[in-house]
Image: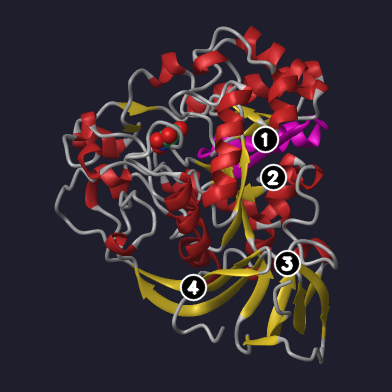
Amino acid sequence: MTEPIIIRGGRVVDPARRFDATADVLVEDGHVTGVRDGIAADGAHEIDARSLIVAPGFVDVHTHLRDPGLEYKEDIGSGTRAAARGGFTTVCAMPNTQPAMDTRATVEYVLRKAAAEALVRVLPIGAVSRERAGTALVEYGDLAEAGCIAFSDDGAPVADATLMRRALEYASAFVRPIIDHCEDPVLAHDAVMHEGWVSTRLGLRGAPAAAEATMVERDIALAEATGGHVHIAHVSTRAGVDAVRRGKARGVRVTAEVTPHHLTLTDEVVAFGAAGGEALLYETNAKVNPPLRSPNDVEACIEGLADGTIDCVATDHAPHAVIEKLCEFDDAAFGISGLETAFGLCMRLVHDGRLDLATLIERMTAGPVRALGLDRVAPGIGTLMDGGPADIVLLDPERRWTVDPQRFASKGTNTPLGGIELRGAVLATIAGGVVVYAQEAARV
Ligand code: DOR
């Protein structure tokens, strides 16, 4: 028995229950046991949340924890510490590890290590194909039973349409989605950034937006044909968003996510950095796949997130070692370390009047849970309903802070946002009733 906690006087935003009002939140024995005004509980530890937002802990459906095998980039301990700092209380771990998460043994390793070292809940995603090689299917029933909440070869697309068709059929027998990294490898053709005037100016090989859109269209057609559920990872183009919108309108089981960086940064960041300027930087920390796109694509992603075409924000947290970015652009690894900047970066949309705060919170809590059906495996996450896990985040939407990658909990300092000021901060994170992160300014 841990002592009860009362989170006092915050604006409680719980989109799953359409609750948005000033209230106290009572936490007992790791669970939420009341959300209402004027809660009294003898001997409870009080947290003063006046002037703060109190929301369900964020849920990230796309996190690269790099464990097993790539612990020099990240491990379950450091990755979940980064998650806690970012306000995330559940992360779904991508299977492009070494070995890939394509067997029960690897999934059990991840869950065992998470039970020992993770600060927040870790839900594993199994590979679609053995060794993520794109040829033979994994054992879907076995991996679902071991705890996989979805299947993905992320980092690579499921390029073979027949394999994708079979994957959708098998996974749906276990009520699991296939998460696809949509990129036609022939069209993308070893590109290192988005194809447009910036790639021309830099002399770098660009991937056309159509490389994403054609595969999104293919996946939607296959989901329609099989009745399976496809979840489009990190959608980044107007054509991709439009395809999802049309698929949903037809009743296809398609869901989608977008990253904070695709909502806020364009391909110009590759050339000039996130602070802008005249000098050509060839910013390897902005090298990511899918690439940062044009302003028109960013606009479409924001519209899609606002109107619900895109179900959720997902970080695609992709930590890499310094040496993998401190090199020529062509040789640098793809990926942005994103857990710790996700909320602050997305708050740009709120401060710019593009998205209201409650919608942003929805897309980081109830949205991802609904998109992937996570409440089947982790009932009550993404909301503050009575009896659910006390996964809670305290947010200050106005607090300004400057991104300092050297202070990240993640081993991955690879962000183009170093030195950039963000407005909107996570002040404290509570996971299962335990304070797993608190800034000094938080009155916890
Ligand atoms: O930029 C990326 N990094 N995109 C991916 O799809 C994979 C990821 C990684 O694992 O580094």
Q: Nearer the viewer, residue 25 or 41?
A: 41
Crowding near pointer 2: few (<14 within 10 Å), some, many (20+)?
many
Q: Nearer the viewer, residue 328 or 296?
A: 328
Give how far apart the Cα atoms at labels 4 and 2 are: 25 Å
Residue found at x 68% / y 48%: 368
Give how far apart the Cα atoms at labels 2 and 3 are: 34 Å
Whether residue 347 is situated above or below residue 270 in the rendered picture: below
Q: Quick one: label 3 or label 1, which is nearer the N terminus?
A: 3
Which residue bears the numbered disc 2? 309
Give how far apart the Cα atoms at labels 1 and 2 are: 7 Å
Magenta segment: 235-257
Q: Nearer the viewer, residue 271 or 326?
A: 326
Name the residue at the left extreme.
279
Which residue bears the numbered disc 4? 424
Is residue 66 among what the camera can see? yes
Q: For the residues labelled 1 and 2, say whether their Cβ atoms are less than 8 Å apart.
A: yes
- Residue 245 within the segment the image draws in magenta: yes
The kind of residue tagged 1 is Val
Give how far apart the Cα atoms at labels 1 and 4 are: 30 Å
Q: Quick one: label 4 or label 3, which is nearer the N terminus?
A: 3
Estimate the x, y position of residue 386 in percent, counting from the top left.
85, 68
Whether residue 295 is situated above or below residue 364 in the rendered picture: above
Ligand 1 shown in quarter: top left
The label shown at residue 30 is 3
Q: For the residues labelled 3 and 1, say whether their Cβ atoms are less than 8 Å apart.
A: no
The kind of residue tagged 2 is Thr
Q: Quick one: label 4 or label 2, which is nearer the N terminus?
A: 2
Which residue bears the numbered disc 1? 244
Q: Quick one: label 2 or label 3, which is nearer the N terminus?
A: 3
